[in-house]
Amino acid sequence: MTGPAGVLLDLDGTLLDTAPALLACLDELLAEHGRPPAAPARLRATASHGARAMVCEAFAVDWATPEAATLERALVERYQRRLAQLQGDQLFPGMAAVLDELKRRGLPWGIVTNRQQRLTEPLLERLAPHHRPAVVVCGDTLPRAKPHPDPMHHALRALGAAAERTLTVGDARRDIEAALSVGAQALVALFGYLNAGDRPTRWGAHGLVRTPEEILGWLPAAR
């Protein structure tokens, strides 16, 4: 198989461990409403699905209700304020070594996330200078987000990488569906934000990785 190669990573629950900051903001919001703190193990699993999913789970409200929309806005506002105060790059342990190896092998990498651009850029600004992605596709970069294939196609064009030689990693079913829809290799990040009801072995992925370091075994040989 010939042609360029690259790697595309999901953001929340794959590249960065963003759940602690989100849960801290959620606890503040719960306290404001006279409720006890969230159960970390239960709510952490919703972090990949966004602020709306977190408030619906924590406050037991329906997704489409005005109350859910109001709580979502309140959580996002708190989180935006916290982003300005966060220190460090929040990479999952072992992920820095993966990015270093991509650089050593000359493999371009990028991010495809459903997180909005305004909530993505502050995080990426704190990445080490040598860990900068070649492309970042956010949830509002295009009219349609994952699991639609458009974000993947957009990222592949920016990388100049052939889909069949591109490795993608994500912790949600939509990540795998988007990757498979364009013909890319797909790995499930089991170290991410999966919940008890997820069945990653049924998502059709090419493999499962329990740690970021296991991604290295799926990379092509150095060029």
Image (cartoon, rainbow, N blue to C red):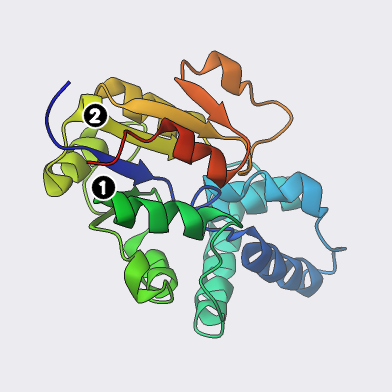
Judged left or right of residue 127, residue 20 is right
Q: Quadrant of the C terminus?
A: top left
Camera-nearest residue between 35 and 212: 212
Q: Is residue 208 visible?
A: yes
Indicate whether 132 appears above or below 59.
Answer: below
Name which quarter of the figure residue 181 lies in.
top left
**Who's the residue at 65% across and 54% down the image?**
55
**Who's the residue at 54% across and 77% down the image?**
88
- Circle 1: residue type: Leu
Q: What x and y, as percent, mark residue 27?
A: 76, 67
Judged left or right of residue 7, residue 115 is right
Camera-nearest residue between 5 and 206: 5
Judged left or right of residue 172, residue 193 is right
Indicate whether 106 appears above or below 149.
Answer: below
Indicate whether 165 appears above or below 122.
Answer: above
Mark 1, other Cα within 10 Å: few <14 / some 14–19 / many ≥20: many
Q: Residue furthest right?
A: 36
What secondary structure is marked by label 2? helix
Camera-nearest residue between 211 and 87: 211
Mark pair 1, 2: CA separation: 11 Å
- Badge number at residue 107: 1
Residue linked to disc 2: 165
